[in-house]
Each structure stands twice: as structure tokens, then as C-alpha cells.
Image (tube, rainbow, N blue to C red):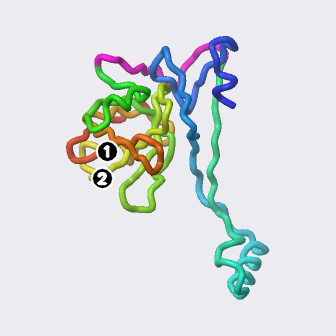
Amino acid sequence: MERAVATPETGVSVYAPTLRLWSDATPSDRGWSFDVAGDLAVPPFQRRLDEAAERAATDEPGEFVNVDVQFAYAILRTDGKRRVDVRASPDRCARMADSEAHVTDRVNLLAVKLSHDLSDGENALYRVGDGSQTVDHYLVCTRETALNRDLREAEYGAVVFVENGLVLWNDDEGAYNVVVDDETVVDLVAP
């Protein structure tokens, strides 16, 4: 919906969270951004349904309990005002739209953090965008250091500068992974 509404023809721009860090680009990747809130309390009737399911041979434990809160949103404006006045520069950063040309290279990126950790606990995985991406991009932290800790600590929607990230193609997911390791520096640019 955001991309259909926020066009030059409508005069509507994105205020948050999926900032356009390149002034002449708009994203066309297939992924979506979502925030996460605290778990819901399980109502008593839902708990009783789940307990009954545990006794039945055909139901899985937890089948009737869903406590996760995940949601997508967009804040749009007609006055062109931006949540943060940060723009990417070709002198300092690679565009995510050009990632194919950088596979197996180390690059600098300006990125908006568009998810919380999506991993199952091994290497932290965060969806990111810069407003130019045509394919999904993820930052994968394989080794956290004091110099890249801002990636984990940054909130959803924060802008981070990634220095010396290794760009790899993930054929299984059809996405680019930018590896954040002990050679990578991540700085919080705007919360």
C-alpha cells in the first residue's frame, strides 16, 4: 500500500519507518517491514483449548496459543517532511540496488533496520533497506564486536552506517546477505 500511495504524482512521501535514503530511488523488493511488540497474555479460554489439544493425538501443543504481536505500518506525509534528514552519498555508500555488482566484495552501506532479529538464535539476522533495493537485503551478524554492536542495539526503523560489510548472494532465499563480522563497523546514525 505504501508504495502505491507514496509516489511523485501524489505528492505523498514516506515519513517512517521505510525511509528513502537515496533521493532518486524507490524500493521494489518483495519483502515487508514489521515491528514487534511484547507478547500478549493468554486468555484462560485459550489456555484451556491448548491444554485439551495436548491430550488429543491430532493436535500439536501450542496450536491454540498465539502470543506474538507483529505489525506493519507506514507514516506518510504530504509536506515532504522526513523523520530524519539523512541521505546516502555515492561517494561513501553502495546502493542496495547495485548489490549484484558487489557480490563477494566488502562495501559501505547506509541502511534502515526493518526488523528485529529474525534468526533462530544462531547468527543474528535483520531485514534492512535503503530505499533503492529491488531484492530483499539482510544484515547477518556472524561475530558481534564492540565496533558492530550498534546493529543489535538499534531499534526498529533506526538508520545505521555499515562499514566494510561483505555482500553475498543467498540462492536459497533469493536475497542478498551482507555479513557483519569482526572486520565490520556498524554505527547508529539516527534512532
Q: Amino acid at mark 2?
A: Thr
Q: What residue is drawn where x is 56% and y is 29%?
A: 28
| CB within 8 Å, label 1 to label 2 | yes
For residue 47, side relative to residue 85 (left or right): right
User: Vertical placement of 104 versus 57: above or below?
Assistant: above
Q: Which residue is mark 2?
A: 142
- Residue 81 on the magenta span: yes
Q: CA distance from mark 1 to mark 2?
A: 7 Å
Indicate the quadrant where residue 55 lies.
bottom right
User: Vertical placement of 31 versus 101: above or below?
Assistant: below
Q: What residue is drawn where x is 36% and y is 56%?
A: 123
- Residue 115 on the magenta span: no
Where is residue 73? Give x, y as percent: 64, 37
Q: Amino acid at mark 1?
A: Val
Q: Which residues are magenta?
A: 78-91
Q: Which residue is mark 1?
A: 179
Image quadrant containing the C terminus? top left
Question: What secondary structure prevails in the magenta region?
Answer: loop
User: Vertical placement of 39 versus 103: above or below?
Assistant: below
Where is residue 133? Give x, y as percent: 48, 30
Q: What residue is drawn where x is 62% and y is 59%?
A: 68
Secondary structure category for the residue under label 2: loop
